């Protein structure tokens, strides 16, 4: 079957992409690792011993970066609808984050680990990362709505699990619904910065919100 012009262009750009080449050279599973690396360089968020959630984790580029900052004293909990090969200091669940049973399975994994390590408290997570994106249909309105659903779910998860003072980093496609969610995020966190990492393709509408200082158990819920 012949490739479409758009898919052929994407493949050509992908294999010529300097970040793709750097990812192979440095042993990262995806070029997206450089996005998180830059965000954390500008805003140091992850420290040794922290527990961090990575939503939309596969193939594991962000988990690799997060685990490097958490070190052996911390833990990364990764979730994706796609399978992900094992990584040191990372525990992962495969499933659809939008499905309640998967959501509960993921939360149960975190609770079990907390019990095993004698961690107490209802709030166990220091930071939530989300690089989730829907399968794109090519119809802007549909894709925007689907992406906002994922961003809103990531925000809800952060508000339900973060310790006071925790952080949330989320990929956002700017458009319908993003301003309303940004208003909610700024109410729930002390500071929200909008960034576009160098590794983000210029034509992409994606930006990343870096939210610091989760305010309280009730805020944003």
Image (cartoon, rainbow, N blue to C red):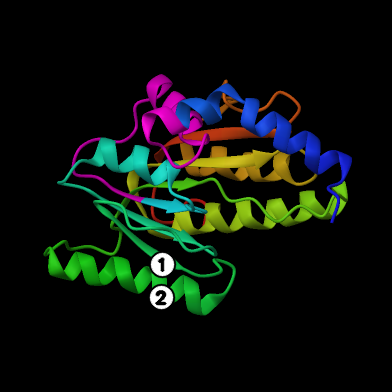
Please state, as top left, top right, bottom left or bottom right, where the N terminus lies in the image.
bottom right
Q: Is residue 108 among the parts visible in the rendering?
A: yes
Q: Nearer the viewer, mark 1 or mark 2?
A: 1
What mark, if any, has residue 19 been given in the picture? none
Residue 2, placed above or below residue 116:
above
Q: Which residue is mark 2?
A: 105
The picture places residue 132, in percent across and down from the top left corner, at 58, 51
The image shows residue 103, relative to residue 141, as above or below, that is below
Q: Residue at x 17, y 70 (%)?
A: 115
60 vs 155, nearest the viewer = 60
| Residue 8 locus on image (x, y percent) | 79, 39
- Secondary structure found at label 2: helix
Relative vertical location of residue 214 with respect to residue 37 in this rendering, above or below: below
Give the magenta-colored segment's residue range: 24-52
Left or right side of 216 for 19: right
The reply to whether dot 1 and dot 2 touch (C-beta < 8 Å) is: yes
Within-10-Å neighbours for mark 1: few <14, some 14–19, many 20+: many
Q: Gap between marks 1 and 2, in whole Å?
A: 8 Å
Where does label 1 land, which residue? 93
- 213 or 17, nearer to the observer: 17
Residue 56: horizontal and vertical position, in percent? 52, 54
Q: Of all residues shown, which one is farthest toward the left?
A: 118
Picture quadrant where residue 29 is located: top left
Sequence order check, earlier mark of 1 and 2: 1
């Amino acid at each position: 079957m012949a490739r479409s012009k758009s898919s052929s262009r994407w493949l050509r750009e992908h294999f010529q992409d300097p970040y793709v080449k750097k990812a192979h050279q440095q042993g990262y599973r995806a070029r997206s690792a450089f996005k998180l690396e830059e965000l954390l360089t500008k805003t140091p968020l992850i420290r040794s011993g922290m527990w961090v959630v990575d939503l939309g984790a596969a193939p594991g580029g962000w988990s690799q970066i997060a685990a490097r900052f958490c070190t052996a004293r911390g833990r990364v909990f990764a979730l994706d609808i796609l399978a992900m090969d094992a990584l040191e200091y990372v525990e992962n669940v495969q499933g659809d984050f939008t499905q309640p049973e998967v959501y509960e399975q993921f939360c149960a994994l975190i609770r079990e680990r907390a019990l095993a390590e004698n961690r107490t408290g209802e709030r166990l997570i220091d930071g939530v990362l989300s690089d989730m994106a829907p399968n794109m249909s090519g119809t802007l309105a549909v894709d925007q709505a689907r992406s906002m659903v994922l961003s809103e779910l990531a925000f809800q998860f952060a508000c339900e699990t973060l310790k006071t003072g925790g952080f949330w980093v989320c990929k956002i496609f700017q458009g319908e619904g993003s301003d309303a969610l940004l208003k909610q995020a700024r109410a729930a966190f002390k500071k929200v910065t909008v960034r576009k990492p160098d590794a983000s393709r210029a034509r992409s509408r994606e930006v990343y919100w870096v939210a610091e200082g989760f305010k309280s158990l009730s805020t944003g819920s």
